[in-house]
Amino acid sequence: MRYNRTLSQFDWMHWVEQLPIGTTIMVVEDDAVVRECLRELLADNCRVSGAAGAAEALECMTADGVPDVLVADMQLGSGMGGLELTTVARLRWPGIRAVLITGTTVADPVLDPGDRFLRKPFSVEALTHAVWELATRQDRLHTP
């Protein structure tokens, strides 16, 4: 999808356009509208998949490969949340990078040094910059 760029869109589109072509991103969000919105925002130059929960995300990663960046909501309805998903995924695929997001007032989580945490509502620029930052790191250990 291409956007007619306005001044307010420049900053976030800059980060999306700077992502390496073929970057893989998985958005794990139980709210279908939010999940689709995030997928659309990140879709230029990238292959973006989505999952409604942690179990579905792990199934997709097993079948389709590990994404370069995992964007996961901390609170995913039932079952494990984004932080638990990231922990479980790292047991199988060390080095996976995550942007954890939340709309609740939970305390800031203890994260892997390479991960990022954003509170909703966050700016589109904050999300795209965090994804760019993790996708371009050279120390990822998994093999997608």
Image (cartoon, rainbow, N blue to C red):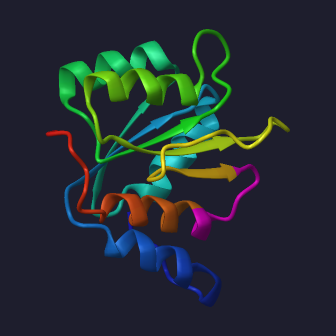
Q: Tell me: 104 left or right of 82.
A: right
**How far from the left and from the top, in percent, is residue 10?**
53, 84
**How far from the left and from the top, in percent, is residue 80?**
57, 15
Rendered residue at 62%/37% (across/down) = 33
Q: Is residue 56 above or below residue 14?
A: above
Q: Nearer the viewer, residue 75 or 137?
A: 137
Q: Which residues are magenta?
A: 119-126
Rendered residue at 85%/38% (across/down) = 105
Q: Tell me: 64 left or right of 6.
A: left
Q: How many marks?
A: 0
Residue 11: quarter of image? bottom right
Q: Nearer the viewer, residue 80 or 20?
A: 80
**How far from the left and from the top, in percent, is residue 54?**
48, 19
Q: Is residue 62 above or below residue 39?
A: above
Residue lying at the far top of the rendered structure:
79
105 in magenta? no
Q: Tell me: 57 left or right of 10.
A: left
Rendered residue at 65%/10% (across/down) = 78
Rendered residue at 30%/42% (across/down) = 95
**How far from the left and from the top, in percent, is residue 64?**
20, 27
Q: Is residue 115 above or below residue 143?
A: below
Residue 111: quarter of image? top right
Residue lying at the far left of the rendered structure:
143
Q: Quadrant of the N terminus?
A: bottom left
Q: Nearer the viewer, residue 109 or 34?
A: 109
Q: Quadrant of the C terminus?
A: top left
Q: Nearer the viewer, residue 140 or 62?
A: 140
